[in-house]
Image (spheres, rainbow, N blue to C red):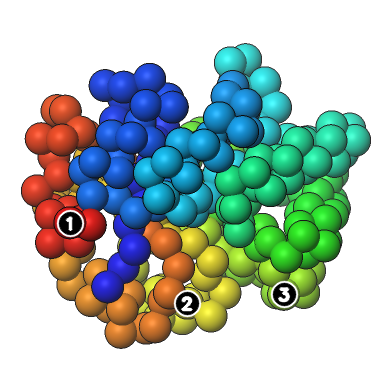
Amino acid sequence: MPVFAANLTMMFNEWSFLDRFDAAAAAGFTAVEYLFPYEAPPEAVAERLARNDLQQALFNLPPGDWAAGERGIAALPGRFDQMKADVERALEYAEATGAKRLHLMAGLADPADAAATIAYRRSAAYAAERLADKGLDLVIEPINGRNMPGYFLNDFGSAERVISELGHANLKLQFDIYHRQIIHGDVTMALRRLMPITGHIQIASVPSRHEPDGEELNYPYLFEEIDRLGYSGFVGCEYTPRRSTLDGLGWFKPFARS
C-alpha cells in the first residue's frame, strides 16, 4: 500500500505552517512533505514531526528568490556558489528532520542554452555528491510548462538522460504523475519503465490539480500499479484541495492511520 505524504505547502492551508503537522497527523497521515521549510527553525520542524510521529518524506533545496519569480538556480550560470551554500542550508534541515531525499529545482532557463545545460549538470553533480556524503538521495523533477512557463527541466527524457549520464547512484527521478500526464501522457508505461530510477512520486488530478479522485486519471488503478511495481517510497499529495482540506480527504480514508 502506498505511504502517502501530505504536502503541507498545498494542503492544510487552514492552519499555520507548523500547525499543519498536527492537522495532517490528526487526519491520518504518517508522512509529510512541503516545498520549503526555511522560514521555520529546523528544531521547530523536527519537534512537530516527533510530536506527531510523522516521517519527513521530502523538501526542496532553497529556490533562489522565490518572491521575485525565481524557481531554482541550478541551471542559472553564475549562481554555483550560491547553490553550494544552499545545499549546506538544506542539509541542516535534513539532519534535523530525518529527510532522506531532497529536490533540486532547476530554475527558469532555455533547455537549448548550452550555458544553462552546463550549469545545471554541474549543480546536479555537486549536489548529488554532497548528499551522498550524508547518505541522502537527490531527486530532479520535470515540471510542465503550463504551470511553470520557462522551467529548464520540462521533459522526462531530459531528466532520464541527466540521471544516466551523471551516473550517481543517489541521483533519482521525482515522478510527478500530474506533470507526466500533462507533458507526455502514457503514465502507466512510464512508471513501469522509469521505476528503477524513481526516488519519489507525487499525485494530483489532471487537469485541475485537485484531489486524486477523478478527472483524466484512474488513481485507484495507478495506486495498484505502483504497489505491483514494488515501489517502497513515499507518494506525495501535491494538490490543491477543491474546498477545505478535510472535506476532500474521502479518497484517503482507506489509507489513513487509525
Image position of 71 (left or right of 211):
right
Q: Which label's residue is closer to the chain start, 3 or 2?
A: 3
| Residue situated in front as seen by the camera: 19 or 155 | 19
Label at residue 183: none
Q: Looking at the image, which residue is at 81% across and 49% down?
A: 123
Secondary structure beneath dot 2 equals helix
Tag 1 residue = 258
Q: CA distance from mark 1 to mark 2?
A: 30 Å
Tag 2 residue = 195
Label at residue 169: 3
Q: CA distance from mark 3 to mark 2?
A: 14 Å
Label 3 Cα neighbours within 10 Å, binned few <14 / some 14-19 / many ≥20? some
* Above or below, 69 relative to 42: above
User: Residue 37: which quarter of the image?
Assistant: top right
Question: At which x and y percent is residue 157?
Answer: 57, 66
Q: Looking at the image, which residue is at 49% across and 76% down?
A: 194
Q: Which label's residue is closer to the chain start, 1 or 3?
A: 3
